[in-house]
Image (cartoon, rainbow, N blue to C red):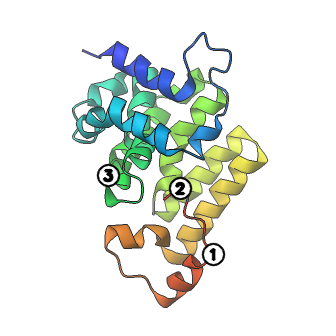
């Protein structure tokens, strides 16, 4: 059985409650988090992240709202809760798997473009070039210059290095000389 109150709590936290005047509008906090917002994310959803990553919430994939909440728990929330650690990426495989299932079921069409964006983010967080190409195609359906620019930047980094060099240190990966040079001025995407 799906715990709809938890699904609703997650969606309301990220997109603001349904009756809120700014519900489903783009929020700066998504891209420029604060320590306070990160701490609130940990306090409210830290345990749910672990449960989601372990597969304990896979039943949420049976509805569009549940799948979106699961993607947020696995893709976005770890980046807030575990910033600048390897755990920031702990949910990426589950998020990508859930995003693939969601697209196959056309769940994203039930939502506004600001919601759909998060069905597509796991592809842009992948270090697989094919996923990056998919992210570019998906973001293209949303329009918006910033979305397309960001997707292309992510794709280009993975095309060049085969991975995101800014993750190397926390993941215990050795950086190549080319990556070290790149990292001097590179975007770290909040990490």
> Which residue is drawn at the image coordinates 40% and 39% (left, top)?
39
Instruction: Depth check: give the residue in front, 63 or 38.
Output: 38
Residue for point 70% across, 38% down: 142
Give the Cα distance between marks 1 and 3. 26 Å
Q: Quadrant of the N terminus?
A: top left
Counting residues from the start of the chain, the first of labels 1 and 3 encountered is: 3
Give the number of the disc on residue 168: none
| Cα distance between the residues tagged 3 and 2 | 16 Å
Badge 1 is on which residue? Answer: 185
Local SS, label 1? loop
Q: Residue at x 33, y 60 (%)?
A: 86
Asked if residue 88 lies left or right of residue 103, the reply is: left
Q: Which mark is residue 90?
A: 3
As drawn, the residue found furthest toward the bottom would be 177
Viewer-side label of 3, 2: 2
Asked if residue 132 is positioned above or below residue 72 in the image, the reply reads: below
The residue tagged 2 is 190
Splitting the image into 4 quarters, where does residue 141 fall? top right
Q: Secondary structure at mark 3?
A: loop
Choose the circle earlier in sequence order: 3 or 2: 3
Give the x, y percent position of residue 178. Answer: 54, 87
Distance CA(mark 1)–CA(mark 2): 14 Å
Residue at far front of view: 36
Q: Residue furthest top?
A: 19
Answer yes or no: is residue 63 visible: no
Q: Residues within 10 Å of mark 2 (few under 14, many from 20)?
A: few
Q: Is residue 62 left or right of residue 108?
A: left
């Amino acid at each position: 059985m799906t715990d709809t109150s938890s699904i609703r709590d997650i969606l309301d936290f990220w997109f603001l409650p349904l009756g809120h005047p700014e519900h489903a509008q783009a929020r700066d906090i998504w891209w420029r988090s604060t320590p306070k917002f990160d701490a609130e994310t940990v306090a409210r959803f830290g345990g749910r992240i672990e449960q989601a990553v372990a597969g304990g919430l896979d039943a949420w994939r049976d509805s569009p709202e549940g799948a979106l909440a699961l993607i947020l728990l696995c893709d976005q929330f770890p980046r807030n809760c575990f910033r600048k650690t390897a755990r920031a990426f702990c949910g990426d495989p589950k998020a990508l798997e859930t995003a693939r299932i969601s697209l196959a079921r056309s769940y994203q069409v039930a939502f506004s473009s600001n919601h759909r964006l998060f069905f597509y983010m796991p592809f842009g967080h992948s270090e697989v070039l094919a996923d990056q190409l998919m992210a570019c195609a998906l973001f293209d359906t949303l329009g918006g210059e910033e979305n397309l620019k960001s997707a292309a930047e992510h794709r280009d980094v993975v095309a060049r290095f085969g991975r995101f060099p800014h993750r190397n240190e926390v993941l215990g990966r050795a950086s190549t000389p080319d990556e070290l040079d790149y990292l001097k001025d590179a975007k770290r995407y909040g990490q």
